[in-house]
Image (cartoon, helix red, strand yellow):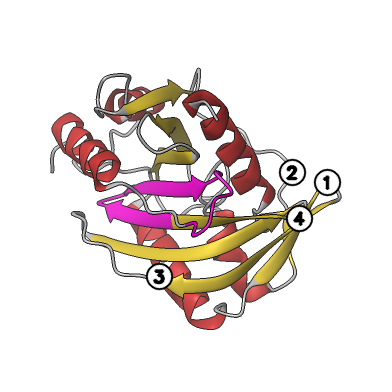
Amino acid sequence: MRPKASARAAALILTALLAAAACTGPPDGPVESVNGPSRTPATLLRAALAPGDVPGYQVFADPSPDDSRGAAPRADRAACAPLAEVMGERPDDRARATVSRGLGSRDTPGLAVTASLSAYSAADARHLVDGLRTALAHCGAGFGTVLDGQAATYTDVRATPYEITGAESVSWTATATAQGAPAPVHVVVVRQGATVVRFMAINLSGRAPSTANVPHAVADAQLAKLARTAPG
């Protein structure tokens, strides 16, 4: 599978595995970046990965930051909603703006990676990470989702260690199954100030043994670019 095709397929599968929003009500306070209340879609765009930023990967950009939200899938277990929600177009409804990138590996056929930056208030960013940790403690047995009549499931949901910079982070793996096709998924969520950075890797090769890991080359490059663009 070509890198661009794999990145698009990954985005499609991951979006199909979303759950309903875990948080309700208005966001708490103004949007803040890692160096003050100046985060805008334009600064997210400057901080996002661009072609040439990660050797060995093709980078595919959304044409503009996401400032809208479509229909959300429904999870069969409310406690697991934060885990599924974070893999969608936005981490949750409190994200004020999100910029996403798809990356296809030139060296690992079938590996697709997404990297996204989302603007929050500082309180909401912390709330998101706390919610993910709580959900992981209750959702190891897995859960299912439905979106527009399409069902998908997560199984073997496990918290995993992942060395990465940032104020705090959470990482987990799972097996995603949609339309009868299982694929391993790895998700890493990093909070840096009021910016939430999400990384997702999915292995679409169908080969056994099949694993997926967020490449450190991608994660390190994105966090380093964020630090250069919005130091603090």
Q: Earlier in the sequence, mark 1 or mark 4?
A: 1
Q: Name the spot of residue 184 as percent of width and height, x first.
A: 53, 57
Real-space Cα separation, disc 1 to disc 3, in angstroms: 29 Å
Q: Where is mark 2, residue-wise? A: 71
Question: Could you tell me which secondary element the residue under label 4 belongs to?
Answer: loop
Q: Earlier in the sequence, mark 2 or mark 3?
A: 2
Q: Which residues are magenta?
A: 187-210
Q: Earlier in the sequence, mark 4 or mark 3?
A: 3
Q: Amino acid at mark 1?
A: Asp
Query: Can you tell which of label 1 and label 3 is closer to the viewer?
Result: 1
Query: Can you tell which of label 4 and label 3 is closer to the viewer?
Result: 4
Q: Nearer the viewer, residue 73 or 231?
A: 73
Q: Where is mark 1, residue-wise? A: 148
Q: Are marks 2 and 1 in contact (CB under 8 Å)?
A: yes
Q: Residue at x 86, y 50 (%)?
A: 149
Q: Where is mark 3, residue-wise? A: 130
Q: Amino acid at mark 2?
A: Ala
Real-space Cα separation, disc 4 to disc 3, in angstroms: 32 Å
Question: Could you tell me which secondary element the residue under label 3 belongs to?
Answer: helix
Real-space Cα separation, disc 4 to disc 2, in angstroms: 23 Å
Q: Where is mark 4, residue-wise? A: 180
Q: Nearer the viewer, residue 122 or 78?
A: 78
